[in-house]
Structures are given as structure tokens and as C-alpha cells.
Image (cartoon, grey):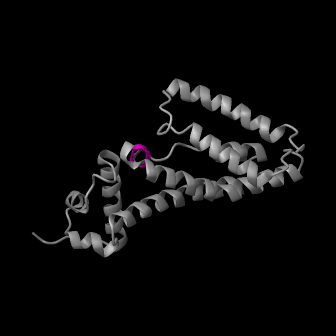
Amino acid sequence: MARITKNPEERKAEIMDAALELFASKGFEHTAVSDIVKKVGVAQGTFYYYFKTKEEIMVALINRSLVEHETTIKAIDQDANLSPFEKVNAILFPKPIHQKVGDFLHHENNAWIHQKFLVQKINEMTPYLSRILAEGTKAGAFKVKHPQETAQFLLTAVNFMLDQGIFAWDDMNLVEKKRAVKQIVENIVLKDNTSE
């Protein structure tokens, strides 16, 4: 049987996708490099051509997800048809992440990876949300005295509270929580909070 040669980027993506599935189903700690290459159907050396360690592929998976997320955030930030408040809501309450990424992050053995992902996500989103809050305040849409700290607070609170991997909200509960949190966000950014 002839050996199938794939484009290096296609092969790398295939290895990452296989690792993502296994990390989601078995957990990072319980997945071996041998499991990944077996799933892809390649030699172990092929894995090491692209990644030095299992930790490196995990970082690559997180970074890939964050790059996709940042592309969405940039589009929201640059959308002239959205009001400042619509931009705030779109950044704080985005579409759910890819199911397999969610499964990977929410696996009980991957809690430390989940925490790392949330911190990176919040750090990545803070400059965009800070600028929107500052510009919205300058334009009179908001009354936010500390845009950066407000952005960090809102991102941390929303990402933590509405994360079903942290709190096991059922779907009905999650809808209710999201509705309440949106009202809280509105009170924070639209209410006069200029006093110390």
C-alpha cells in the first residue's frame, strides 16, 4: 500500500485535532503520545517532527483557539454598525466555543489547563474591551472611570460565572444567569460610577 503524503500544515492540524479529541475524552494526563499517533495512523516520529512534547501540543491547541477567538473580537471591535454597548455585549457574551474545545477544557483532569486558558483569554480581550469602554465614555455612551480595571473585572466575572465547566448550570439556569449578568453589566457601564 502506498504511503499517503500530506501537506505539513494539514498533517499538523490532523495531529492537533486527534489530540484535542483524546484530551477531551480521556483528559490530558491520561493521553499518551502513542494514543495520538495511533488515532492519526502515523509513526511516533511524525508527532515529534511537529511537537517536542505533549505539553507543546496542548499549548498549540490553546493558542489556536485563542487566535480564532481574537479574530472574532477584532471583527466586533471594528464593526461600525454596532453601538458601544452592543460591542460590550458581543465581547462579553460571544457564541459558545467549539464543542470539542469545551469538552477538552471542561474535562475534570484538565482543570489547570482550563484555568490557563481563561487567564489568557481574559488578557487577550482586555485591551479591546478597555478601549471600547474608554471610547464609549468619551462619546457619552458610558460612565466608566477606570476602563481597564472595569474591563478586567467584567471579563473575569462573566467568564468565570457563566462557564459550565466551573459551575454545572443546567441550560435553563444558564439562560437565567446570563440574563441577570447582562443587567449587572448594563448597570456597571451605564450607571454613574465616577465616584471613588
Residue depicted at x 54% and y 51%: 118
Res 2 visible = yes
Residue 108: quarter of image:
top left
**Is residue 86 found left or right of 100 in the rendered image?**
right
Q: Residue 1: x, y in percent?
A: 9, 69
**Residue for point 73% across, 43% down:** 86
- Residue 5 visible in rendering: no
* Nearer the observer, 7 or 158: 158
Quarter of the image for residue 41 reads: bottom left
Please provide percent x and percent y for residue 164.
49, 36
Q: How many marks?
A: 0
Q: Please tell me in which quadrant of the rendered image residue 3 appears.
A: bottom left
Q: Nearer the viewer, residue 34 or 87?
A: 34
Toward the front, the furthest residue is 196
- The vertical placement of 37 against 134, above or below, is below
* Residue 126 screen position, x and y as percent: 68, 55
Rendered position, 173 above or below 89: above
Judged from this view, the residue extending furthest toward the bottom is 49
**Of the pair 163 and 10, the residue shown nearer to us:** 163
Along the horizontal axis of the image, is 177 left or right of 54?
A: right
From the image, give the main secondary structure of the stretch colored magenta.
helix
User: Who's the residue at 33% across and 68% down the image?
Assistant: 53
Q: Position of residue 76 (x, y in %)?
A: 67, 52
Quadrant that contains the C terminus? top right
Instruction: Give the residues drawn in magenta, as a range.
Output: 101-107
- Is residue 109 placed above or below 6 in the rendered structure? above
Q: Residue at x 23, y 73 (%)?
A: 45
**In the image, is residue 188 part of the stretch drawn in magenta?**
no
